[in-house]
Image (cartoon, grey):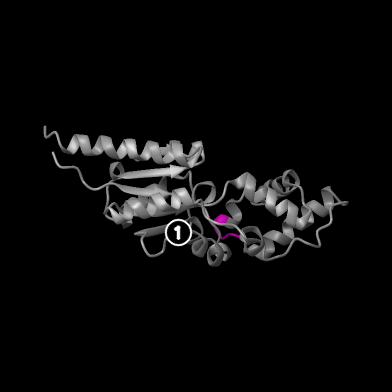
Amino acid sequence: MTLRKPFVWFDFGGVLSPSLPELFDTYAERTGIPSVILQEAMAAVALEYSMPTLAPIELAVVDERTWVRKLHEVIAREYPGVDLTRSELDFGRQWFDGHRANESVRQFALELATSGIPVGILSNNVVEWEPYWRPMVGLDCVVTDVVDSCKVGVRKPDPSIFGLAAERNGVLPNDCILIDDIAENCAAARQSGWSAVQFVDAEQAIGDVRELLSKRNALSSHPV
């Protein structure tokens, strides 16, 4: 039996990006808005749309500037003592400024692509943030596809995003491996027929993916 080539999909936020706590902490330092208050405001705005946190902006239901204004309204109402003057409407620019990709994960993606294994980015992301996160990651020259929630109109953990990613690249679900830091997303991928590795840190995730790839190679070298 000859197995088809695997397709490895990388999440952006929390995998290719710096850790989410690092991003929240840096934003808090820059703006003076405590992370817990910002996250509370994000959840409150999402509730207006009866959606999970960040879904309105990750599905492009609301544009970035409108979303930030709504965050400011919630914070001003619930925490009137918080100074909002340093929080800019260009949230993505301020959020990503000065940050670099997780270099170990980035190098692993480059290694896979160089070895002939297709790699992609499967991300819940925001239209207005693309000019910041894609240059930061610097993988446009090697990725086969970028499946971005704000462009395809569906976000993880909705199973349809996994079906869409596989179908438009002409691969079967069991060809796909997802690396994602969110357990719910990994579970949804597995339920869709994918393999999934939950990212805890770069060393662990890279090791787990190597193990999955090694098992596939072992199967292909033992015909049945």
| Disc 1, SS | helix
Residue lying at the far right in this picture: please name it: 81
> Where 190 sits versus 147, above or below?
above
The answer to whether residue 210 is left or right of residue 147 is: left
| Magenta-colored segment: predominant secondary structure | loop
The answer to whether residue 51 is left or right of residue 136 is: right
The answer to whether residue 182 is left or right of residue 223 is: right
Residue 195 appears anywhere in the view: no
The quadrant of the picture occupied by the N terminus is top left
Q: Which residue appears at 22% of the width and 39% of the height?
A: 217
Q: Amino acid at mark 1?
A: Val
Question: Would you identify the image quadrant in which residue 143 lies?
Answer: bottom left
> Where 70 sits versus 181, above or below?
below
> Would you say residue 60 sits in the magenta stretch?
yes
> Would you say residue 143 sits in the magenta stretch?
no
Categorize mark 1 by other alpha carbons within 10 Å: few (<14), some (14-19), many (20+): few
Range of residues picked out in magenta: 58-62
Question: Would you identify the image quadrant in which residue 187 lies?
Answer: top left
Percent across and percent down for residue 9 are 39, 49
Percent across and percent down for residue 43 are 68, 46
The quadrant of the picture occupied by the C terminus is top left
Q: Which residue is mark 1?
A: 152
Q: Nearer the viewer, residue 22 or 131?
A: 22
Percent across and percent down for residue 102 are 51, 51
Residue lying at the far left in this picture: please name it: 224
Q: Nearer the viewer, residue 143 or 72?
A: 143
Residue 85 appears anywhere in the view: yes
Q: How many marks?
A: 1
The answer to whether residue 86 is left or right of residue 106 is: right
Percent across and percent down for residue 221 are 15, 37
Q: Which residue appears at 40% of the width and 44% of the height?
A: 178
